[in-house]
Image: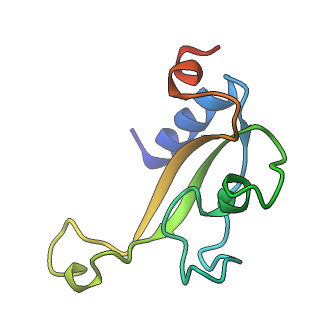
């Protein structure tokens, strides 16, 4: 499977279960506590903290991220890179994993 197909299959699965597809946020987030996007949930942090109301109670995304946890290993091995995409599904008090996977 090509990476574009993996992304599409993932997003289509969750959209078919009522989640709203949201685009990746910028690699340099509008969050002063983060230098770079390092997780899929970064753009939803204000929603999880109760500082903002989400546009939808359910969301799915493919977030572009930069790996920063082990920068000293990047380039030394084939397992360590600087960029990855985090595929995620998020609920803002609406469901838990068992419900969304089952499709309810």
From the viewer's perspective, is 30 left or right of 2? Answer: right
Q: Nearer the viewer, residue 10 or 19?
A: 19
Estimate the x, y position of residue 76 in percent, counting from the top left: 15, 80
| Occupied quadrant, residue 92 | top right
**Quarter occupied by the N terminus:** top left
Q: How is the image coloured?
A: rainbow
Residue 25, picture quadrant: bottom right
* Spot occupied by residue 23 in the image (x, y as percentages of width and height): 70, 55
- Front in this rendered view, residue 74 or 99: 99
Q: Residue at x 54, y 79 (%)?
A: 36
Instruction: Indicate the position of residue 10 as horizontal and vertical percent values.
Output: 53, 36
At a point 70% along the width and 30% down the height, the residue shown is 94
Quadrant that contains the C terminus: top right
Circle count: 0
Above or below 4: residue 37: below
Measured from the top left, where is residue 96 in percent x and y?
57, 28
Residue situated furthest left in the rendering: 77
In the image, 30 versus 73, the foreground residue is 30
Q: Is residue 72 left or right of residue 38?
A: left
Which residue is more in the foreground, 7 or 59? 59
On screen, 81 above or below 62?
A: below
Q: Residue at x 59, y 80 (%)?
A: 33
Image quadrant where residue 29 sits: bottom right
What residue do we see at 57% from left, 58% from top?
63
Q: Is residue 59 above or below residue 83?
A: above
């Amino acid at each position: 499977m090509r990476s574009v197909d993996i992304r599409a299959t993932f997003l289509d699965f969750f959209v078919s279960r009522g989640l709203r597809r949201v685009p990746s946020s910028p690699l340099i987030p509008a969050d002063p506590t983060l230098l770079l996007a390092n997780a899929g949930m970064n753009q939803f942090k204000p929603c999880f903290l109760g500082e903002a109301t989400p546009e939808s109670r359910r969301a799915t995304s493919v977030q572009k991220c930069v790996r920063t946890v082990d920068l000293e290993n990047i380039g030394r091995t084939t397992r360590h890179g600087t960029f990855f995409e985090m595929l995620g599904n998020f609920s803002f008090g609406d469901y838990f994993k068992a419900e969304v996977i089952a499709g309810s």
